[in-house]
Image (cartoon, rainbow, N blue to C red):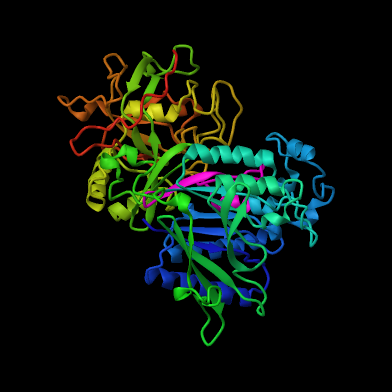
Amino acid sequence: MALTWLHVSDFHFTSGDGYERDVVLKSLVDSVRWFREHGRQPDLIFATGDIAAFGKADEYRVATLFFNDLIAAAGVARERLFLVPGNHDVERGKGVGLARTLASAEESTAFFAPDCPKWQISQKQRAFVDWYNGYFSGIRSFPEHSSCGPVEMVEIKGCRVGVLPLNSALFCSGDDDFEKLWIGRRALDAAIGQLKELGADLRIGLIHHPLSWLSGTESANIKAKLTKSVDLLLRGHLHDADVENVAGVAGKLLHLSAGAAFQESRYPKRALYATLDNGKVTVFPIHYVDGPHEVWAHDTGLFPREPGHVKNFDLPALVGRCSSGSVSAQFWEGGRPPSWADTWGRDQFGSWVEFVVGDVRQRMRWIPPGRFWMGSPKDEAERFDWEGPRHEVALKKGFWLFDTACTQALWQEVMGENPSRFQSPDRPVERVSFEDVGRFLQRMEKRLPGIGLTLPSEAQWEYACRAGTTTPFSFGVTINTDQANYDGNYPYAGGSKGVDREQTVPVATLPSNPWGLFEMHGNVWEWCEDHWHDSYNGAPTDGRAWLDTASPDGGGRVLRGGSWDASARYVRAAFRVRLPPGERFGYLGFRCALVPVSKAGRQEEAVPVILAQSA
């Protein structure tokens, strides 16, 4: 299947009068929308540096507005936008006293050690890092101890795309940067190792500078490593639009330079669309035309003698590599994702899949099968008797789980109303009963036929919350209000007090657990499928919900996780509580689960048991 991306670079956002820039970039947004409506739909967007002009925080506020408009025009989610910094994303005044460059390979080995502070990033690129982490909150974060990463894989149309971002701007200082810049072989080796583990079909490196700008001490090595490890290298900096099939000792690497999206009026503004289809990359260049209409149009001057003014570049190693097979297809019947799956991929937490309802996107995480000890040990501080007896549960079936509680945006889209007390689209929906959730699940099935969402069983919920840990919290033996949203006036086991927010927080605001699940501790209580039982005596040991079909709901349904108004004691992984299924309070929410089912109705095991915890 064909995979298309848009490659843009060198924006130079400033906080002052940006009339000329705004005309050019607004027309880029409008033109990307037009290209999309006329069949050129990008699956990914890559931006290769110089987001800002001087690396100042207020410049990135302008950039936020542009990128929001760009991804909306392109019809892609923020997760499909990847970018790296350039030399203009460095605040040069904050580099006083820092090394101008490195003098030797030995210095590079020491400097690029994982535990060595990189003041060139944390000081000179501070504004960029803070903006990046805020803009991609809940998606990815920018590494401050490495020049490489975050390495990530996204799966689109059956093609597993691995992305390797490279920060070539650490040592940028002035107009004399040529041959003074470093990536660091040590940092690159680690990142390449991560990229190989992901098993991508297509591997794309992103960098701002041409490799010739790296120090001569390492440039040949970096070029050889990238040639062996990635298929395409996308760059910016020189403001030229160009494509080169560069040969080296390790083979050939296709270099694509997008040109500058904005620079002074007397210079051209360019960008590239590219499509990969069965080992052939077709480059479709575009450029800004100032009159009589301000528009970005097909740039016929880059390949003037090629048919249609586009050019094809053969990558024989990619023939057959991007096919209908998928990293997540192992979880579905016939090796093909179902129709409701919009995007899927794998990152440092494991596999994920996303669906879209209206304009609302929800990610689910793959929770692998395994064994764990459910409940709390008798010596756990502040436990309750109904958290035992502790018993081993073996989940032979993996399942998908919302990575966040259901948001108000998703609830509103499906149900047409919002009952929440603390209203905001990105906060968890609350004041929903168990019965309300049942109606939500029915309507979800109508919107996305075959998706088959359910509530998790109590065992599934605790297994996912613990994420391989055995401590009271997935964060360890204690917790604080920087990790979870609970009433900080009531800390755990004599710990320090924290903040009492007295309300919910937006989902994915606080750190995730080791499996990429957000706010499993606190924020809102989450309904589970199970009927309440006063102990685990007689409970299923295979992860199924414990249902009393012969008795009414008088005993109530189980809730897990604690909430914003609960003490730390109640946000432990093992704590459980009950409420009648019709209750609605401003601290009651939920997240959905999905167990893959084959066409024959058999739950897919997908992967072998991988986790065994001791008592």
Any part of residue 141 in sight: no
- Residue 300 horizontal side relative to residue 550, left or right: right
Residue 544 versus residue 601: which sits nearer the camera? 601
Q: Quadrant of the C terminus?
A: top left
Q: Residue 524's x, y, as percent?
A: 42, 38
Q: Nearer the viewer, residue 224 or 403?
A: 224
Looking at the picture, how far across and down is residue 78, in whole percent? 48, 55
Q: Was residue 135 drawn as part of the magenta stretch in this picture?
A: yes
Magenta stretch encompasses residue 103:
no
**Is 179 placed above or below 581 here?**
below
Report x, y in % for residue 587: 40, 39
**Relative to 223, is 44 on the left or the right?**
left
Check the image and report above or below for 396 versus 93: above
User: Would residue 89 be visible to someone looking at this image?
Assistant: yes
In-image side of 506 versus 216 (left or right):
left
Residue shown at 57% from the left, 77% from the top? 23
The extreme bottom residue here reads 292
* Residue shown at the point (55%, 65%) measured from the top left: 66
The percent coordinates of residue 36 (x first, y second) are: 40, 68
Q: Quadrant of residue 599?
A: top left
Q: Is residue 397 left or right of residue 184?
A: left
Residue 74: which quarter of the image? Answer: bottom left
Provide the residue span drawn in magenta: 130-159
Q: How many marks?
A: 0
